[in-house]
């Protein structure tokens, strides 16, 4: 009887972890696992998120000791985020695209509320960490599978030169197997190069997401007392294989920051964990590079996508905009921000409109901070920044030990200073 009860509890726990893993994976799917409706993109993961969030929100009404700290945390944060969205909706009132701006604000509230209910609620506490590990592991394994299929096996990809992202689908069985998307670039050594990006819109988003998750993965591996890091080496390797300069920059900053922090505090055990992860990740990449296709891909990343080319694109951004380089587009977009902001400095101008290429809500710049400034003005920008700072402050004040605080803060800093400056 006791054995049956234990088996039932373990089965329920595994099912809960797998369901949460599906939420993390599908919420990261900008393509394929989505539904297009009236030009808007609805990820299937957001439906699963809502299903979990409803009982999580209901739990907050139960005045138990377990919920007391969470209610206090949310009580402190609610005014800051409420003020930001109030300003954003005022920007919508002054916007020529009132409906679109209002929809974007509502969509932001929906995502933040549901994520808070699931990630902070006690109902999912036992399964959340395992679900997060499994979800990020699945995305990383998909990146590895894409890289092997493209550069080792050299399986053909049906590409359309009018669109950068190409779906990878193989029909070895009676049904097709979707392997996500890859972005084609240029011919290199007589081979059309592709960079894998799972089901994200493009490699930059995939690199940003995995590098943001990487410090949290390091923490959870150590917390669960694994003898060796089973997930973080695969995540680090996937970030490199994506070929996103943003993701690789984040990875370097994370390793340096975490190593220096643990070294100063003499956290030798944590630094050993970090070096185990780095060593295993490097070993996996070396094995990948032993194949001619793998070494060609790394030569491509170091050459046409290397630091020298980035500097050249930034310096010659006017010419590179015509060629469609991301560096040129980002630089030109940032240079236009002051002029556009001064047209509506206080309240902003709301959402510019629908993007005909992605059928989504267009951003004013390829930079999240600039996007917030242009859409909600200086007041909205300061409210957004203030809400983020308060969130970080209250989170770190909840009896967080040094290793956890360092890893979480590193994830935040990389996300806010790098990711949000290079993506919209």
Image (spheres, rainbow, N blue to C red):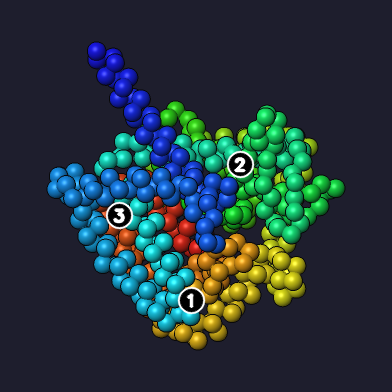
Q: Position of residue 109 (x, y in %)?
A: 36, 61
Q: Nearer the viewer, residue 270 or 173?
A: 173
Q: Which SS class for mark 1?
A: loop
Q: Nearer the viewer, residue 408 or 132?
A: 132
Return the mark for residue 143: 2
- Residue at 14 percent across and 48 percent down: it is 63
Q: Can you identify the residue that label 3 sits on?
A: 395
Q: Can you identify the residue that label 1 sits on?
A: 97
Name the mark nearer the viewer: 2 or 1. Answer: 1
Instruction: Report, in whole angstroms, how far the alpha carbon at label 2 lies from the one at label 3.
Output: 32 Å
Q: Which SS class for mark 2?
A: helix
Instruction: Report, in whole angstroms, how far the alpha carbon at label 2 lies from the one at label 1.
Output: 38 Å
In which image quadrant can residue 169 be found? top right
* Among the two numbered marks 1 and 3 on one chain, the one whose residue lies closer to the N terminus: 1
In the drawing, does residue 246 fall left or right of residue 187?
A: left
Decide: few, some or many residues near mark 2? Use Cα within 10 Å; few <14, some 14-19, many ≥20: many
* Among the two numbered marks 2 and 1 on one chain, the one whose residue lies closer to the N terminus: 1
Decide: few, some or many residues near mark 3? Use Cα within 10 Å; few <14, some 14-19, many ≥20: some
Image position of 54 with respect to 39: above or below: above
- Residue at 55 percent across and 69 percent down: it is 354
Image position of 324 with respect to 30: above or below: below
Instruction: Report, in whole angstroms, how far the alpha carbon at label 1 lies from the one at label 3.
Output: 36 Å
Residue furthest to the bottom = 343
Does the CB distance between marks 1 and 3 fall below 8 Å?
no
- Residue at 54 percent across and 41 percent down: it is 139
Does the CB distance between marks 2 and 3 fall below 8 Å?
no
């Amino acid at each position: 009887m006791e054995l049956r009860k234990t088996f039932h509890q373990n089965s329920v726990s595994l099912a809960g972890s797998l369901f949460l893993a599906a939420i993390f994976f599908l919420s990261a799917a900008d393509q394929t696992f989505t539904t297009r409706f009236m030009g808007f993109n609805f990820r299937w993961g957001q439906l699963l998120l809502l299903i979990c969030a409803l009982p999580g929100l209901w739990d907050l009404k139960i005045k138990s000791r377990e919920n007391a700290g969470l209610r206090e945390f949310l009580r402190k944060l609610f005014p800051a985020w409420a003020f930001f969205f109030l300003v954003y909706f005022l920007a919508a009132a002054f916007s020529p695209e009132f409906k679109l701006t209002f929809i974007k604000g509502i969509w932001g509230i929906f995502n933040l509320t549901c994520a808070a209910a699931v990630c902070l609620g006690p109902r999912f506490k036992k399964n959340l960490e395992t679900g997060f590990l499994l979800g990020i592991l699945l995305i990383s394994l998909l990146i590895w599978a894409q890289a092997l299929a493209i550069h080792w096996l050299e399986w053909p990809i049906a590409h359309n030169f009018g669109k950068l992202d190409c779906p990878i689908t193989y029909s070895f069985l009676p049904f097709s197997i979707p392997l996500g998307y890859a972005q084609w670039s240029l011919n290199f050594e007589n081979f059309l190069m592709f960079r894998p990006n799972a089901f994200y819109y493009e490699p930059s988003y995939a690199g940003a997401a995995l590098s943001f998750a990487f410090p949290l993965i390091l923490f959870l591996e150590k917390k669960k007392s694994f003898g060796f890091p089973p997930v973080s080496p695969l995540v680090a390797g996937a970030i490199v294989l994506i070929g996103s300069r943003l993701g690789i920059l984040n990875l370097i900053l994370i390793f340096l920051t975490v190593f220096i922090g643990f070294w100063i505090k003499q956290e030798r055990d944590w630094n050993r964990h970090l070096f185990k992860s780095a060593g295993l990740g490097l070993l996996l990449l070396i094995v990948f590079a032993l194949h001619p296709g793998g070494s060609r891909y790394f030569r491509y990343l170091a050459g046409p996508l290397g630091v020298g080319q980035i500097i050249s694109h930034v310096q010659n951004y006017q010419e590179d905009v015509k060629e469609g380089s991301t560096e040129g587009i980002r630089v030109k977009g940032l240079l236009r921000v002051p002029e556009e902001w001064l047209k509506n400095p206080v309240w902003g101008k709301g959402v510019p409109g629908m993007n005909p290429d992605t059928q989504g809500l267009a951003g004013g710049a390829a930079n999240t901070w600039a996007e917030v400034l242009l859409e909600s003005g200086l007041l909205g920008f300061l409210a957004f920044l203030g809400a983020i700072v308060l969130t970080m402050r209250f989170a770190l004040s909840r009896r967080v030990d040094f290793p956890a605080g360092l890893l979480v803060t590193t994830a935040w800093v990389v996300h806010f200073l790098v990711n949000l400056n290079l993506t919209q």
